[in-house]
Image (cartoon, helix red, strand yellow):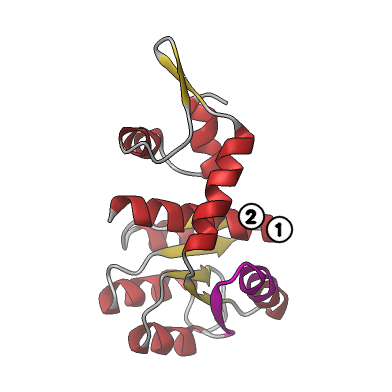
Amino acid sequence: MTLEEVANYLRVTEKTIYRLLDKRGIPATRVGHQWRFDKTFIDAWLFQSSMETEAHVLVIDDDDTICSLFKDTLEDAGHKVTTVNNSSEGLELVKKGDYDLVFLDLKMPGMDGAELFRQIRAAKPETPVTVVTGFPESDLMMRALEHGPLGVMKKPFKGSDVLTTVRNYLRLSTRTK
């Protein structure tokens, strides 16, 4: 894969890939003036790093099926997962707990995901948040983006997408600390 392709595959910027290359943290081969990446080695690198680090993940989504998918997938990979079905309870957990990563649904009854994200940023500004949405181009998404950087996971997705997102976060967070 090219640098652009691996950045898209890992859902990060090319700048992040260059940072990982500088630290020799990502498996790559230099061919002339360009970098090349083997998907098999990238997958093994992600898997190894995710097994070395356990994440404490909070999932805030009003859909029980989505919560179960996150919980089953991540617990099978050795992570600790807490799920809640409403924004208010999710906000209280964020305030009381110390989560490595929060996934939140953008469109929920009561307090929507954009407002919840704003309140999470006010309470715990360093907590990484990934918005789960079927509406990435919506006004609600634009409102969420006003409150700072966040990850985005577009619905529909599979368990492997959840694992890839958490593995990427874990790999990148341990490399930037």
> Where does residue 146 sit, x and y in percent of width and height?
33, 59
Q: Is residue 140 above or below residue 39?
A: below
Give the quadrant of the C terminus.
Answer: bottom left
Residue 72 appears left or right of 23 = right
At a point 44% along the width and 53% down the height, the residue shown is: 171
Q: Residue 108's mark? A: none
* Identity of the residue drawn at 35% across and 89% down: 96
Q: Are marks 2 and 1 in contact (CB under 8 Å)?
A: yes
Residue tagged by mark 2?
161
- The residue closer to the viewer here, 12 or 137, is 12
* Most foreground residue, 53 or 19: 53
Point out residue 53 in the picture as x, y percentages from the top left corner: 46, 64
Disc 1 residue type (three-letter): Lys
Residue linked to disc 1: 158
Left or right? Give the position of 147 relative to 59: left
Q: Which residues are magenta?
A: 69-85
